[in-house]
Image (tube, helix red, strand yellow):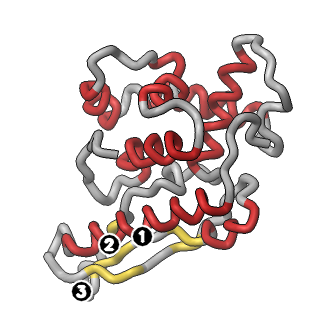
Amino acid sequence: MWNNWTFDAGFWRQLTRIDLELAEQVRQRECADCGSPLDRSDFGRKPRGDLGQAAGEFTRRVSLCCRRDGCRHRATPPSVRFLGRKVYVGAVVVVASIAGRVAAAGLRWRKRPIEGVPARTVKRWMAWWETAFALGSFWLEAKGFFATPVEVTELPASLLARLGGGGAGAMEKFLRFISPVTTESVRTRISMAV
């Protein structure tokens, strides 16, 4: 399924640990509206994509909610596991988008690009990278971190290449870097210290 990408159960567990760390950072800030403490208030997800033994860890999205009655402001931290509201996990979206770009360019892959992800879904993701992502406020600010411009028409592969290329370590850096786009309820700073 992953072609040259190998993500074992340890990779998926590491993403869960990172999400928990990000949630703890948000929880320590307290409610942005009233200053009250935040409590865990996770919500269910039914992610698609082959996660193997780690699939059980992806059934809940970490989220927080203000403790004070009358406020109850939700603060959903950034995530490296989920790419916003997409039903596939973030790493699957990235790899499938790269495979779609390769297939669109007429290059050959050793195997079918991504099993279980419909071609129309991959096309929609490729368009998302070039429009919603590339024209969004996150990328308009984040692209300034790169001395040489990242090729927008080659996203996400061009950004992943800048962050270390292929492999689980580079994917983790990539997902950390773009994590601010995974939430609208918590403003996070862009950081190259990934």
Type of amino acid at the residue the image marks with label 2: Glu
Q: Which residue is mark 2?
A: 24
Q: CA distance from mark 2 to mark 3?
A: 19 Å
Mark 1 surroundings within 10 Å by alpha-carbon count, few (fewer than 14), some (14 through 19), many (20 or more): some
Mark 3 surroundings within 10 Å by alpha-carbon count, few (fewer than 14), some (14 through 19), many (20 or more): some
Q: Secondary structure at mark 2?
A: helix
> Which is nearer the N-term, disc 2 or disc 3?
2
Q: Secondary structure at mark 3?
A: loop
* 79 vs 124: above or below: below
Q: Residue at x 82, y 41 (%)?
A: 115
Residue 108's quadrant in the figure?
Answer: top right
Q: Residue at x 52, y 62 (%)?
A: 14
Type of amino acid at the residue the image marks with label 3: Arg
With 92 as the anchor, is 32 left or right in this view? left
Contact, CB < 8 Å: mark 2 with mark 1?
yes
Residue 23's quadrant in the figure?
Answer: bottom left
Residue 165 image point, x, y percent: 52, 30
Q: Which residue is mark 3?
A: 68
Q: Residue furthest top?
A: 106
Mark 2 surroundings within 10 Å by alpha-carbon count, few (fewer than 14), some (14 through 19), many (20 or more): some
> Which is nearer the N-term, disc 3 or disc 1?
1
Q: Residue at x 26, y 52 (%)?
A: 188
* 83 vs 94: above or below: below
Image quarter hosting the N terminus? top right
* Disc on res. 20: 1
* 181 vs 42: above or below: above
- Of tags 2 and 3, the one toward the viewer is 2
Residue 27 image point, x, y percent: 28, 74
